[in-house]
Image (tube, rainbow, N blue to C red):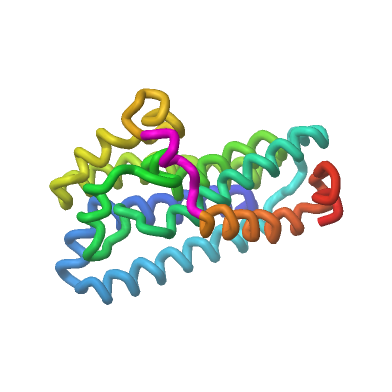
Amino acid sequence: MSGLVLLALGTIAFVGTHLAMSHPLRMRLVGQLGEAGFSLLYSLVAFATLGWMIWAYQSADAWPLWTAPDPAWTAASLIMLVASILLIGSLIRNPAFPHPGAAKLAKAPARGVYAITRHPMNWSFILWALTHIAVYGSLRNLIVAAGILVLAVAGSIGQDRKKRALLTDWSQWQARTSFIPFGALLSGRAKWRDALPSWIAIVGGFVLWLAVTSLHAPQVSLPGWLGLI
């Protein structure tokens, strides 16, 4: 079996088990295993399928169908700075996280990255997938990026459906926010003055972006001093 086929199967396994265990199977599994048991099973399955993907990715053909010119790599890197800020911002006061204070957060006005999009974490993955598809068209890269894109979009839809059933205020949170970035701001449902990400999101996102970009230094041409990384 070729490396690309193994990678495709691993990606399907990773995305499929993540979506299934996060949404239709979650309540049943929690009822049978408890929260701790479910978390352990979820982590084991996630690590196993992710490991499968990494192993298959390394053995798959890396020959690109297309490679973007240098300016596109620069643009992609800057888009990933935005994605990094969204990702770090999503770790702070996220009403979608399963914790006791989530209900109160869903009642509050949308601020920071949540004024930009209701799903900042998933949008960081969507931006990652789209930029990687655009700049480097190897089949192994396209398989992984497409899988992450499907996971992020389907995960956002499933999360909204699940949270509407669990939290009485989630429908109001949806009404004050948007899935599409800047949608709530442009429609007036969220205020522009509330859309500035927190300093933790900005600083943390920049540090994350800087660290990851340094790994891509041979491929990315950045202006000025940033080109030194």
Q: Is residue 39 above or below residue 79?
A: below
Judge from the rendering whether residue 56 lies leftward or rightward of residue 174; answer left or right: right
Q: Seen from this angle, which residue lies furthest front?
A: 193
Q: In which quadrant will I find the C terminus? A: bottom right
Q: Position of residue 51 (x, y in %)?
A: 54, 65
Residue in front for this viewpoint, 91 or 43:
91
The mark tally for this picture is 0
Q: Is residue 185 magenta?
A: no
Q: Residue at x 76, y 53 (%)?
A: 216
Residue depicted at x 41% and y 25%: 186
Q: Which residues are magenta?
A: 191-198
Between residues 127 and 207, which one lies in front from this camera angle? 207
Quadrant of the rendered image containing residue 142: top right
- Which residue: 16% across, 52% down? 166
Verify whether residue 193 appears in magenta. Answer: yes
- Out of 39 and 94, give the one closest to the viewer: 94
Q: Is residue 15 above or below residue 33?
A: above
Residue 151 shows in the view: no
